[in-house]
Each structure stands twice: as C-alpha cells, then as structure tokens.
Image (cartoon, helix red, strand yellow):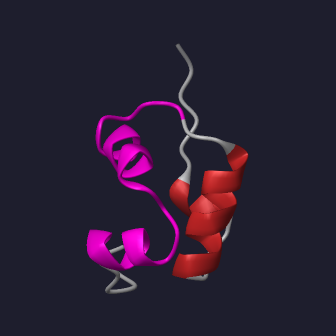
Amino acid sequence: MKKKQVSQYQLINSGVDRKTMDALRHNRNVTIITIEKLCNILDCTANDIIEFLND
C-alpha cells in the first residue's frame, strides 16, 4: 500500500469493508474475493501481497 500510495480509507471506499480491514491488520484469514479486490485496487498480483510460510 505504501509503494502504491493507497490508504486504508481508499481501500474502504473501493469496496473493502472495515471488518476485512481489521482481519488484514491482525493477519487473519480473508477470502480469495478480498485478495482479488486488493489486487485490482493496488494493480498487483496475489504474489505481491501474499506470503506463504511453512509451519
């Protein structure tokens, strides 16, 4: 978000609801639809915003 200069306010105005924003801030699960919205808003791919870690 910093690289693209997009604020949380802009995400909310672009269709990402506050509950989802809270989940993102606390590293909770989000849906693929949310990932798609974020990618469209930030003009990026899922690989740019998702990191998979081995347990």
Tell me the magenta residue range: 8-29
Q: What residue is at 39 percent from the left and 39 percent from the top?
A: 23
Reply above or below: 42 against 33. below
Q: What residue is at 48 percent from the left and 62 percent from the top?
A: 16
- Quarter that holds the N terminus: bottom left
Q: What residue is at 53 percent from the left and 58 percent from the top?
A: 49
Instruction: Tell me if residue 23 can be seen.
Output: yes
Was residue 20 drawn as part of the magenta stretch in this picture? Answer: yes
Q: Residue 51 at what x, y percent from top left?
A: 54, 44
Q: Residue 35 at what x, y percent from top left?
A: 63, 55
Q: Is residue 12 left or right of residue 15?
A: left
Nearer to us in this view, 54 or 16: 16
Q: What residue is at 52 percent from the left and 78 percent from the top?
A: 42
Looking at the rendering, which quadrant does residue 27 occupy? top left
Instruction: Tell me if residue 2 can be seen.
Output: no
Q: Is residue 20 left or right of residue 3?
A: right
Reply above or below: 53 against 32. above
Reply above or below: 47 against 32. below
Q: Residue 30 at what x, y percent from top left?
A: 56, 39
Q: Is residue 31 left or right of residue 19?
A: right
Q: Residue furthest bottom?
A: 5
Q: Residue 24 at what x, y percent from top left?
A: 39, 45
Q: How many marks?
A: 0
Q: Residue furthest top?
A: 55
Q: Main secondary structure of the magenta part?
A: helix
Was residue 38 drawn as part of the magenta stretch in this picture? Answer: no
Reply above or below: 48 against 34. below
